[in-house]
Image (spheres, rainbow, N blue to C red):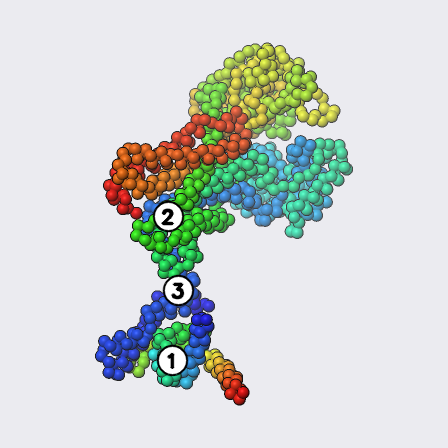
């Protein structure tokens, strides 16, 4: 049961990272973590370190790529950006979510009617 | 996937990069926190907490790499470190393994060379020897016409060719005339072997036609030796057996088919050799691409049957055709059981080595217990623990195997040198890829064999007990002790079998060595002459040659005596079936094989042998009407026990004399000699010898026996001069002292005996070491017990005896069981080489073995016991 949860969490996190990079352009790890926290209104406060586990997974799947660069305050940091296949994956995932959300939504309204 | 693999190799670099990333991230967090108003310290602490646990780095590594493989690599590194740290232990284990695996590798190399590899020709394993078989199961040569028939009818063989051994004398202006081994081949032989000449050409069909101009192909050795490697040798003329022949080609070095041949000529059958019942040729063939041995055998058998039916007179004694490999043809027989015995022996040594190492590992289990318990506590599964232990044993095995391979290579080289000249030239003992693969397999196998039991046992140790302070847990338990004892008993049994076997062999050899030749070998020399068919066609001509030669030899200055014979001791001139007047008439008695030696009258003078009874041969013996023989005392006591043999008669016979053949002549015994050794002990007769006067049967191939105080080279020169005074083209070969001849005769036994002796010694050493280790360990385990006893007031000496007694009882049990297993095995076996008069059970050897093993056990006890009883009992009680 715990595994299922972590898998779901992984998948969600992947989606969020991809979306973030897609929307914001190249970001370093700190930036991605910060952004996700902001977007989710601090509801998703994961250990910032786990971001990196997600990032490395996405790099291996070739959905994002990494490059060394300099940050705003002149620190050396690795910048991640989304790739073409990453964008495709993002679109597919988003569509999936929408479908699921639609079904659930209809289910819920159904119950209400009854 | 590939990225993951790559990540493994770039581990350090990637680790560093990630560190940097984290550093930057941390710094940014800190900055933010400071901006929010926290103090630098608070900022740091808060930032670190946000970042996550320390295991992040490991998780990162796991996510990006292949964790499974990584752990194996880690385990390997740990294993290496462990081995380096425990130097004595590792050295002992590796030494044992090196010996065991090395012995095995050497044994396998030998077996591989003899049985698994084919002839050194292209697709050599598709070459087979085809021969007739007769009623007694012996192989029979083939007639020229029959070869033609076989070639015409076979579908399975791509081709069949014939060959015939020959000793040829060659003479030309390049060097002294010499006699070399060679072969007559049918024209297609070289092509069938797929052997190209290095220079010039091989035979063509035209070369074997009657009336074709004679040609020869020479070998590289001959080419270098006689012609200095001069390429202009092609086209030169050389007198082969007196006949001028043109050299048309040179074969590359290493080509000596069929056996040590240095020169080849086309087989051109004489008129006599065209007859169907004249069988000069041996036949070999190459299988077709699609054909299999079984099919070829069936086909040749059918062809053979057809020929037997078609030509009943010519194929009277023949029963069928046999298709076999060259190895089977030339080695099978005595070779096979000998080689299997070797493999068995080296396997024993390996098992003993494994038992040793297993015990070593087990005795270390107490030491490892705590470390492994910690691992388990940290979450290592039993599988992982076992895997790690197996990895350790694998490392030991492969290191030991590597060293063993080097040892084996050296041993094989020594063995090959010792076997030089006794085996067909195409058997080359070398360490090749097959051997490497075999050794690798053995290493893996032994790693599992000696590693598994201790590994499983150790992994069973209860974590709690092991972690407890001073906890021995189950490590000193009965299970371990029983396993160790079992191992030791097994080791002892194996060693005993090996030692008994080796002991038998070595004692027989010692008997052989000590066997009195019956003569004084001082200053005794021998040379060979071989009278060619074409120049000495009749017995008369041969006799005349020796008539003229013997007095000339005796007349040489410095020569005390000279004679001619075909059986220089310890050799003989052949063996024949013998019957006496009595046995010929008695029903049901079988004729027996005896040795025969043809001699000139001064034979016994040269050897310094005095007749026991009767008289020596004189110049008349052997002439028609005076068919006489001299026998030795062995024969006399065997065939004429208690009676006077002089005047009695005997004759030679055959098991199945062909019908219409005249019966053998009766020969009269005129003298009896003491035993002079002719023929090795392995021959089927019992050293009973009949001496035949040369006048009766002048030999074609004979040895000149000369006793002289002069150095060998001057004697050789003088003898050669006398021989060539009679016949200028007659070469004289291979001079050696009879003492050297004796050494050669013993080589076969000496090599095998030393091989087995070495193996047995290794086994004994390993067993002794294993025994020592085990006993020492067992005693040290009882240190607590000893301490208790001494603390309770026991006399130290008494305690020592107690421990000693206990250990001895164990060893005695081990030995008893070992012997109970080993002795019936040893008794039941027939040692290859068929040495007669061998005591299957040698009390001296057995006593020696027992003494050594008991001695080792006592020695193993003494030191630990002394140490244990000297220790302050309080310390002993508290000790782990």
Label 3 neighbour load within 10 Å: few <14, some 14-19, many 20+:
few
Q: Nearer the viewer, mark 3 or mark 1?
A: 1
The single residue placed furthest to the right in the displayed view is: B310
Of B605 and B90, the residue lying toward us: B90
Across and down, in percent, residue B706 comes to 49, 21
Say how many tags the image has: 3
Across and down, in percent, residue B163 comes to 63, 39
- Where does label 1 land, which residue? A44
* The quadrant where residue B310 appears: top right
Across and down, in percent, residue A16 comes to 42, 81
Across and down, in percent, residue B532 comes to 60, 29
Label 1 neighbour load within 10 Å: few <14, some 14-19, many 20+:
few
Q: Nearer the viewer, mark 2 or mark 3?
A: 2
Of B539 and A5, the residue lying toward us: A5
Mark 3 → mark 1, Cα distance in angstroms: 35 Å
- Where does label 3 land, which residue? B9
Of A4 and B729, the residue lying toward us: A4
Please give the chain letter of the residue carrying mark 1: A
Tell me the SS state at disc 1: loop
Please give the chain letter of the residue carrying mark 3: B
* Left or right of B675 on screen, residue B371: left
- The residue shown at (62%, 15%) is B628
- Where does label 2 land, which residue? B475
Are the residues tagged 3 and 1 within 8 Å (C-beta)? no
* Left or right of B875 on screen, residue B285: right
The reply to the same-chain question for discs 1 and 2 is no
Are the residues tagged 1 and 2 within 8 Å (C-beta)? no
């Amino acid at each position: 049961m715990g595994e299922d949860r972590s898998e779901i969490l992984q998948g969600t996190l992947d989606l969020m990272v991809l979306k973030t990079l897609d929307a914001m352009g190249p970001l370093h790890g700190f930036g991605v973590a910060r952004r996700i926290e902001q977007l989710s209104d601090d509801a998703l406060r994961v250990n910032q370190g786990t971001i990196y586990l997600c990032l490395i997974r996405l790099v291996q799947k070739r959905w994002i790529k990494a490059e060394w660069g300099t940050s705003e305050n002149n620190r050396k940091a690795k910048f991640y950006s989304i790739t073409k296949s990453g964008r495709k994956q993002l679109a597919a995932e988003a569509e999936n979510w929408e479908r699921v959300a639609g079904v659930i939504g209809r289910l819920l309204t159904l119950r209400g009617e009854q | 996937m590939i990225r993951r693999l790559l990540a493994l190799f770039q581990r350090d670099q990637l680790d560093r990069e990630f560190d940097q990333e984290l550093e930057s991230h941390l710094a940014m967090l800190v900055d933010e926190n400071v901006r929010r108003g926290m103090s630098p310290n608070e900022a740091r602490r808060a930032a670190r907490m946000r970042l996550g646990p320390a295991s992040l780095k490991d998780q990162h590594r796991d996510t990006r790499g292949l964790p499974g493989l990584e752990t194996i690599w880690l385990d390997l590194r740990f294993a290496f470190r462990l081995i380096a740290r425990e130097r004595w232990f590792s050295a002992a284990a590796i030494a044992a393994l090196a010996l065991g695996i090395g012995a095995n590798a050497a044994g396998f190399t030998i077996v591989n060379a003899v049985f698994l590899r084919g002839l050194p020709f292209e697709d050599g394993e598709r070459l087979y020897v085809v021969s007739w078989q007769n009623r007694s199961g012996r192989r029979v040569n083939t007639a020229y016409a029959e070869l033609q028939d076989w070639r015409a009818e076979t579908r399975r063989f791509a081709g069949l060719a014939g060959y015939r051994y020959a000793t040829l004398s060659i003479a030309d202006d390049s060097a002294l005339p010499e006699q070399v081994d060679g072969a007559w081949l049918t024209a297609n032989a070289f092509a069938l072997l797929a052997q190209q000449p290095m220079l010039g050409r091989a035979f063509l069909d035209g070369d074997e036609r009657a009336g074709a101009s004679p040609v020869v192909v020479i070998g590289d050795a001959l080419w270098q030796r006689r012609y200095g490697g001069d390429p202009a040798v092609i086209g030169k003329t050389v007198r082969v057996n007196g006949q001028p022949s043109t050299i048309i080609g040179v074969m590359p070095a290493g080509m000596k088919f069929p056996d040590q041949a240095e020169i080849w000529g086309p087989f051109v059958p004489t008129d006599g050799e065209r007859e169907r019942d004249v069988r000069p040729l041996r036949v070999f063939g190459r299988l077709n691409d699609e054909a299999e041995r079984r099919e070829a055998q069936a086909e040749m058998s059918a062809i053979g049957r057809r020929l037997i039916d078609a030509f009943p007179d010519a194929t009277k004694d023949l029963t069928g055709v046999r298709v076999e490999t060259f190895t089977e043809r030339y080695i099978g027989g005595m070779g096979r059981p000998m080689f299997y015995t070797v493999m068995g022996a080296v396997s024993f040594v390996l098992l003993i080595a494994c038992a040793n190492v297993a015990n070593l590992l087990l005795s270390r289990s107490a030491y490892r217990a705590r470390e492994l318990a910690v691992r388990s506590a940290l979450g290592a599964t039993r599988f992982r623990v076992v895997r790690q232990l197996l990895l350790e044993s694998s490392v030991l095995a492969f290191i030991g195997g590597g060293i063993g391979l080097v040892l084996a290579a050296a041993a094989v080289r020594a063995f090959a040198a010792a076997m030089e000249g006794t085996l067909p030239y195409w058997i080359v003992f070398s360490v090749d890829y097959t051997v490497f693969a075999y050794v690798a397999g053995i290493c893996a196998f032994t790693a599992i064999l000696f590693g598994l039991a201790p590994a499983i046992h150790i992994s069973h140790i209860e974590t709690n007990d092991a972690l407890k302070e001073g906890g021995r847990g189950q490590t000193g338990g009965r299970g371990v002790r029983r396993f160790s004892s079992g191992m030791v008993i097994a080791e002892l049994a194996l060693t005993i079998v090996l030692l008994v076997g080796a002991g038998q062999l070595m004692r027989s050899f010692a008997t052989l060595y000590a066997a009195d030749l019956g003569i004084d070998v001082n200053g005794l020399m021998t040379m060979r002459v071989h009278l060619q068919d074409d120049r000495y066609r009749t017995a008369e001509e041969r006799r005349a040659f020796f008539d003229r030669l013997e007095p000339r030899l005796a007349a040489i200055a410095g020569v005390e005596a000279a004679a001619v014979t075909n059986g220089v001791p310890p050799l003989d001139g052949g063996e024949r079936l013998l019957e006496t007047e009595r046995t010929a008439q008695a029903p049901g008695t079988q004729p027996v094989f005896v040795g025969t030696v043809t001699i000139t009258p001064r034979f016994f003078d040269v050897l310094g042998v005095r007749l026991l009874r009767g008289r020596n041969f004189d110049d008349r013996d052997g002439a028609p009407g005076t068919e006489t023989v001299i026998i030795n005392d062995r024969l006399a006591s065997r065939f004429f026990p208690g009676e006077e043999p002089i005047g009695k008669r005997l004759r030679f016979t055959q098991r199945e004399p062909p019908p219409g053949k005249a019966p053998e002549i009766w020969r009269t015994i005129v003298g009896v000699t003491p035993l002079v050794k002719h023929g090795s002990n392995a021959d089927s007769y019992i050293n009973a010898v009949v001496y035949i006067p040369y006048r009766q049967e002048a030999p074609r191939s004979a040895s000149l026996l000369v006793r002289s105080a002069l150095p060998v080279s001057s004697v050789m020169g003088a003898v050669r001069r006398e021989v060539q005074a009679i016949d200028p083209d007659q070469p004289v070969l291979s001079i050696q002292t009879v003492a050297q001849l004796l050494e050669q005769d013993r080589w076969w036994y000496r090599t095998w005996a030393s091989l087995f002796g070495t193996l047995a010694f290794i086994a004994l050493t390993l067993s002794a070491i294993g025994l020592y280790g085990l006993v020492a360990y067992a005693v040290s385990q009882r240190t607590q017990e000893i301490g208790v006893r001494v603390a309770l007031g026991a006399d130290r000496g008494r305690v020592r005896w107690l421990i000693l007694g206990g250990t001895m009882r164990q060893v005695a049990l081990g030995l008893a069981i070992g012997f109970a297993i080993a002795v019936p095995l040893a008794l039941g076996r027939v040692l290859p080489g068929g040495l007669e008069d061998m005591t299957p059970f040698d009390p001296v050897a057995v006593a020696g073995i027992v003494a050594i093993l008991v001695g080792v056990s006592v020695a193993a006890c003494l030191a630990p016991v002394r140490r244990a009883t000297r220790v302050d009992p309080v310390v002993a009680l508290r000790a782990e």
